[in-house]
Structures are given as structure tokens and as C-alpha cells.
């Protein structure tokens, strides 16, 4: 497993390469993850990511982090 320093460097490089809008989404997602660190949320994100990648490959809508957060929030509150 890479050491924390190399992980941090990799994260910084990848985030720096994003557009400002994408960087804001990353920050919002990190804040949301910190406040909702639980197994069900992580499983949800993993499943929705898989579905979103498949949808993008088919030329369908690619959900933003904000859309996923809203959808997850409505699932949890119901």
C-alpha cells in the first residue's frame, strides 16, 4: 500500500487537474463523506459510481456529486 504522503500527492495532482467546478464538487463530496461515514453510504456511492460509469459509456446522463447527495439524502430520510 502506498504511504500517506504519496496518496496525498496523487490526490493533489488529480484534483489540481480538474476544472474549478469539478474541484468544488470534490470538496462538497469530501465534506459530505466526512459527515456520513457509514457502510451504507459507502456502498451506495460505490454502486452509483458503477452505474454512472456504465451510463456514461452508453452516452446517458452522468450524475453530479450534488445529484447523488440529494438522491442519497432522500433515500435515507424515507
Image (cartoon, grey):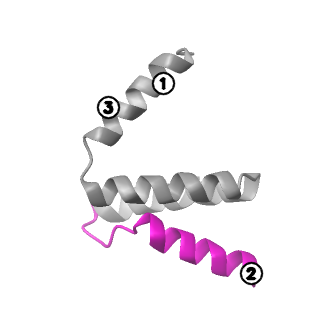
Mark 1 → mark 2, Cα distance in angstroms: 34 Å
Residue 13's mark? 3
- The answer to whether residue 67 is magenta is yes
Where residue 34 sits: x, y (%)? 66, 51
Residue 54's mark? none
Helix, strand or loop at disc 2?
Answer: helix
Residue that numbered label 1 is attached to: 7
Mark 1 → mark 3, Cα distance in angstroms: 10 Å
Helix, strand or loop at disc 3?
Answer: helix
Given residues 33 and 24, the one toward you in this image is: 24
- Please identify the quarter of the rendering in which residue 62 is found: bottom left
Q: First in sequence, mark 3 or 2: give its number.
A: 3
- The answer to whether residue 69 is magenta is yes
Above or below, comparing residue 68 to residue 34 in the picture: below
Above or below, comparing residue 11 to residue 18 in the picture: above
Residue that numbered label 2 is attached to: 77
Which residues lie in the magenta part? 57-78
Helix, strand or loop at disc 1?
Answer: helix
Where residue 44 sits: x, y (%)? 63, 60
* Magenta highlight: main SS: helix
Which residue is found at the position 54% from the left and 51% from the top? Answer: 30
Which residue is found at the position 73% from the left and 75% from the top? Answer: 76
Q: Are marks 3 and 2 in contact (CB under 8 Å)?
A: no
For the C terminus, give its image quadrant.
bottom right
Q: Are marks 1 and 3 in contact (CB under 8 Å)?
A: no
Q: First in sequence, mark 1 or 2: give its number.
A: 1
Amino acid at each position: 500500500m502506498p504511504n500517506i504522503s504519496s496518496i496525498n500527492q496523487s490526490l493533489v495532482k488529480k484534483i489540481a487537474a480538474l476544472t474549478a467546478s469539478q474541484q468544488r464538487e470534490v470538496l462538497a463530496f469530501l465534506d459530505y463523506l466526512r459527515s456520513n461515514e457509514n457502510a451504507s453510504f459507502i456502498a451506495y456511492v460505490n454502486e452509483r459510481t458503477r452505474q454512472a460509469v456504465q451510463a456514461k459509456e452508453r452516452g446517458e446522463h452522468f450524475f453530479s456529486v450534488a445529484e447523488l447527495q440529494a438522491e442519497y439524502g432522500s433515500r435515507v430520510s424515507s
